Image: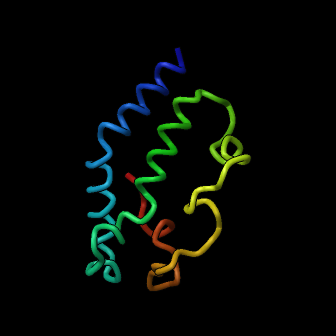
């Protein structure tokens, strides 16, 4: 039964992907340093994160995403590598740590 709920959540994330991204961009644009960024810069790695989240939910595993992906190539958002054009808030925070996902 729990697997069905997780699969349903995965489908919801995929179905609402554009709305989730629009909400993300609206939250990010509220930051003064991000007001002039284009959509691809605002999206950053969020589309890949959403795809990975949906895939992990479908697995129905007790493993964390990091554990499930350990043998594969780590995603850019989890690799610890810096982006080519990093975003930093006024206090030097990264974009992901500055903007809450709602």
Q: Position of residue 44 (x, y in %)?
A: 42, 66
Place residue 36 in its image quadrant: bottom left
Q: Position of residue 73 (x, y in %)?
A: 65, 54
Q: Where is 96 relative to 82, above or below?
A: above
Q: Residue furthest top?
A: 1
Of 86 and 27, the residue lying toward us: 86
Q: Residue at x 51, y 37 (%)?
A: 55
Of 45 and 2, the residue lying toward us: 45
Q: Residue at x 53, y 75 (%)?
A: 83
Place residue 23 in its image quadrant: bottom left
Q: Where is 20 relative to 62, above or below?
A: below
Q: Position of residue 40 (x, y in %)?
A: 33, 67
Q: From the viewer's perspective, tell me whether residue 17 is left or right of residue 8.
A: left
Of 37 and 35, the residue lying toward us: 37
Q: Residue at x 48, y 19 (%)?
A: 4
Of 95 and 80, the residue lying toward us: 80
Q: Position of residue 1 (x, y in %)?
A: 52, 14
Q: How is the image coloured?
A: rainbow
Q: How many marks?
A: 0
Q: Residue at x 73, y 46 (%)?
A: 71
Q: Where is 75 relative to 62, above or below?
A: below
């Amino acid at each position: 039964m729990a697997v069905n709920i997780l699969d349903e959540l995965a489908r919801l994330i995929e179905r609402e992907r554009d709305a989730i991204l629009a909400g993300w961009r609206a939250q990010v644009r509220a930051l003064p340093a991000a007001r002039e960024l284009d959509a691809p810069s605002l999206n950053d790695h969020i589309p890949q994160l959403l795809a990975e989240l949906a895939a992990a939910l479908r697995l129905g595993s007790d493993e964390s995403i990091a554990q499930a992906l350990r043998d594969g190539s780590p995603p850019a958002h989890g690799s610890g590598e810096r982006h080519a054009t990093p975003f930093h808030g006024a206090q030097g925070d990264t974009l992901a740590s500055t903007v809450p996902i709602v």
